[in-house]
Image (cartoon, helix red, strand yellow):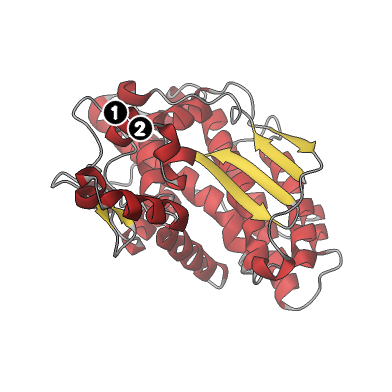
Amino acid sequence: MVKRYLEDYKTFTCIAADCPATCCSGWLIEIDEKSIDRYKSLSKENNDFKENVDFAEECFKQKENKDCAFLRADGLCKMQKEYGEAMLCYTCDMYPRHIEEFPNVREYSLSASCPVSAMQIVENTNYLSYLTEEDDEKDAYEEEEYGQFNDALYGKLLEIREIIIDIFKTENKKFEEKAAVIDNCMKKVQEDLDDGFWDGCEKAFEKIDGELSKTTLKDYVDDLKLMNSLEPLREDFVQWVNKAMDYFSKNRDEEKFQEFEDNISDLDQIKTNIALYFIFTYFCGAAYDDYVYSAARMSIFAVRVVTVLAFKNWIENGDACVSEILYKFCRELENSNDNLITIRQELDETYYQ
């Protein structure tokens, strides 16, 4: 088994009650089948499981404030404290650890929807990197269990991902320049794949045709508008986004935006690491659905949304709060598989525009 780990994966430690934003609130926590069966058995004699688990929907019930029913007032999990860590369902046991599964390959990352993970991405003074290991572990799944997985495409995606990573890590170029190159080339890659030209599609990166358009504040705001297509998970974040869109519909001060970018320390490095996180975590998943362009474009989308919200916060409060914005944004996007699918579809539409 080949295993790739985004840095900090193996050293991650949950800060539990000290976390500024608990992961036990604001979203329905789905329960795996094995845990549901165990909770059903326990519910016959234990009111905690009988009253706090929604067996029909296979998730934990929520309080009125959207806290998990097992979340205590001190910020700790009642199930873990009173019944032991072994009682946790798969989601609670793993989060924020994220695993992408491919035949005989596993890729491990930490979801940026976790404040600690987001902080590690934002405060990293080096470019994000990953390490690769290989062991004798056998794949637990049969080939047919991988559904629509395209092995030939996956091989190409691995090559292209390395090219994209190298471009993002290019020194002496602004993030927007690197993003424009990737966006331009990935449109060619998608076109080649759609036309059946598999061999050499990665060569689209060898030559840039024409002058690349300059990224403006409008491009950032246009990406922010795509957030309206997502299922809202946290009303306070939705209101925050709507207020930002309302503000930018009336104010498009490019000079102020440039001032913001010039004054936020290491902003270009932060943008690059956010993009690298999304490329590593989600790009090769296009082997399941062929949405190759949107898998790359999502990294640029994430950077633009986080940046323009940080800009709005800087205007109002003098502080960008990038780490906080990153994890709140990712909670809307990553904590809902439907939202991940929706944004990929929305970004795929931009390929045809």
Q: Residue at x 22, y 24 (%)?
A: 74
Name the secondary structure under disc 1. loop
- Residue 80 numbered mark, or none: 2
Residue extending furthest toward the right? 199
Q: Residue at x 52, y 24 (%)?
A: 266
Rendered position, 163 above or below 197: above
Picture mark count: 2
Q: Residue at x 86, y 67 (%)?
A: 199
Foreground residue among 139 and 134? 139
Rendered position, 189 above or below 107: below
Q: Position of residue 241 (x, y in %)?
A: 28, 48
Q: Residue at x 58, y 39 (%)?
A: 109
- Residue that label 1 marks: 76
Residue extending furthest toward the bottom? 195
Foreground residue among 26 and 84? 84
What amino acid type is highlighted by mark number 2? Gln
Q: From mark 1 to mark 2, how far is it between C-alphas?
A: 8 Å
Foreground residue among 84 and 152? 84
Q: Position of residue 115 (x, y in %)?
A: 40, 31
Foreground residue among 115 and 267? 115
